[in-house]
Image (cartoon, rainbow, N blue to C red):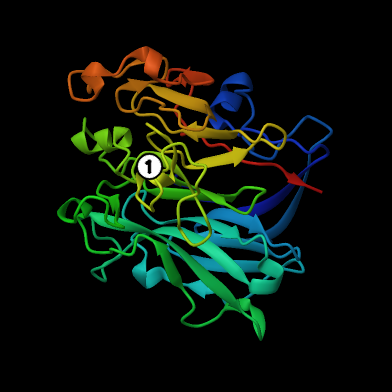
Amino acid sequence: MRSRLNAVRFIAYESLFMVLVVVAALLVLQPQRASADDFTDPAFTTETVATFSPFSLVGMAFAPDGRIFVWQKNGVIRIIKNGSVLPTPFLDISSKVNTFDDRGFWGLAFDPNFATNGFIYMSYVFENTGNTNDSGAKTSRFTRVTANPANPDVALAGSETTILGSVGTPPCSAQPVGSDCIPADGSSHTIGNILFAPDGTLYLGNGDGADAGFADPLALRAQNLDSYNGKILHINKDGTAVPGNPFYDGTNSVHSKVWLYGVRNPFRFNIHPVTGDIWFGDVGWNTWEEVDRGVKGANYGWPCYEGAGVQSAYSNQAPCNTLSAGAVTPPYYTYNHSVGSTAISAERSHVA
């Protein structure tokens, strides 16, 4: 999650297929290789598109017109156009993005109708005090910004609209149950990936928002359907709940927006192009990393379960003390930190 990318590379794969990028597993299988772009499979090619120094890039996305949008942890979005990095950022919201430890600006996605409406969706940890390195409790936001019709290489001034996370005063525990407040109490496991489904609805990942340094009781929110934490949400573009969701109650309650729950940090995920299933990497704690097949309404057990077994640090706490293994969807694949300790991530190939 603490990405420090010095260059953005376009990776072209010849088939339409989603891949899981499991860095640690690759290191175990080929320990002699140190270069991330040293592929032996002839189906892979690499090309250096642009060099970014000293910027700290954490993500990239291809616009429908071929421009590459890249973003920094601090909330600066830049564009690579015709092989060059444009000198003026598309957007700079660094003054309101908290970057303490693993917090930051993590998600960006283009509206399916981006070519006509210019909408871009973003997710980040909101800074409410002016000190972007403040270690105190924070909240997260899911917002939308519009490209300037007169110059689409920059955002329209004042166009950012908050879709989820309108309550920006932490802690969320001080707000009434069901408030539009997305907790980011700990220094990591915050809001992350944004992904549109073929039907125009979208999925939004959000970690448990707890402290990773100890058995933080706040992690138990992943088991609470009335909390945004530890979930992958399924919502419409305006933030409303999708009626077909597994816990939909006819309102825009938090649990009406939940697609799956019981996850620690689903930082990156994707949709299988054939089955429509979500595949995600759930970043582990001290022992296990997981690859999970995301199923509608499923509970993945965190923090009661981690990897293939019980997480003893939480097993005596409610609801873990009554949550049976049979009620939990097990991981599709796990690996122990003894064979690789890099945080797991699920990404998607880009097709030439």
Reply above or below: 45 against 162.
Answer: above
Q: Which residue is mark 1?
A: 207
Reply above or below: 13 against 332.
Answer: below
Image location of residue 169, percent across then percent down: 22, 63
Residue 55 visible to an observer of this rendering: no
Image location of residue 293, percent across then percent down: 55, 27
Circle 1: residue type: Gly
Image location of residue 98, percent across then percent down: 33, 61
323 or 145, nearer to the observer: 323
Residue located 60% across and 55% down the image: 60
Q: Residue pushed farthest front?
A: 250
Q: Residue pushed farthest bottom?
A: 150
Reply above or below: 113 against 230.
Answer: below
Label 1, secondary structure: give it.
loop
Location of the N terminus by quadrant is: top left
Image location of residue 137, percent across then percent down: 22, 54
Residue located 59% across and 60% down the image: 70
- Number of residue marks: 1
Image-quadrant location for residue 188: top left
Residue 82 visible to an observer of this rendering: yes
Image-quadrant location for residue 41: top right
Residue located 41% across and 22% down the image: 288
96 or 114, nearer to the observer: 114
How many residues crowd around disc 1 within 10 Å: few (fewer than 14), some, or many (20 or more)? many
279 sits left or right of 207 in the view: right
177 or 164, nearer to the observer: 177
Reply above or below: 48 against 43.
Answer: below
Residue located 55% across and 40% down the image: 269
